[in-house]
Amino acid sequence: MDRSIALKAGLVQIALVAVISGVLAVTLPKSFFEEWGWLSGPGAWMACAALTATVLRLPVAGAMIGAGLAGLPSVVAVVLGLHWLGALIAVVLFALWCGRLALDRRLEATVL
């Protein structure tokens, strides 16, 4: 695993999620999240993951798969009422995925 990319991916993802969460919280009423949070949250998460992959020059498709998988434990946390803990766990898992993705990309480049 590329620890440097994992750390960067985690920091970039946290920053992007924080920014988009803040913007959405300021611009939309609470009722929006009660009705559409199940869609807007994962959509924002995936958009942030795509941007993180772009910033770090990782394969976007691979990062999107990792973001989807990393988000699954977050669903359990949301059901338990621990939304932000779930988001933190998802960021850590996504960062680890990106670190592995970077290593896989580097190994592919050396084989070819």
Image: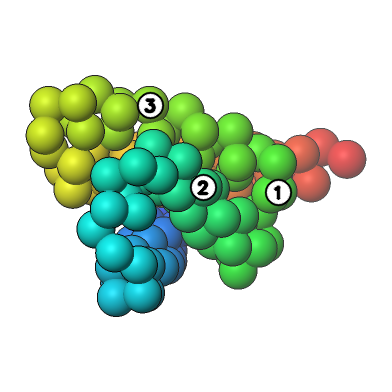
- Residue 64 placed where, x, y %? 60, 41
Q: Amino acid at mark 2?
A: Gly
At a point 51% along the width and 47% down the height, the residue shown is: 43
- The mark that comes first in sequence, 1 or 2, is 2
Q: Quadrant of the C terminus?
A: top right
Residue 24 location, quadrant: bottom left
> Is disc 1 placed on a helix, strand or loop?
loop
Label 3: which residue? Answer: 72
- Residue 58 placed where, x, y %? 65, 54
Image: 96 above or below 25: above
Real-space CA distance between mark 1 and mark 2, rounded to the nearest whole angstrom: 19 Å
Q: Residues within 10 Å of mark 3 (few under 14, many from 20)?
A: few
Real-space CA distance between mark 1 and mark 3, rounded to the nearest whole angstrom: 21 Å
Q: Residues within 10 Å of mark 2 (few under 14, many from 20)?
A: few
Give the label on residue 59, or none: 1
Give the label on residue 43, or none: 2
> Is disc 2 placed on a helix, strand or loop?
helix
Callout 2–callout 3 Cβ contact below 8 Å: no
Viewer-side residue, 71 vs 9: 71
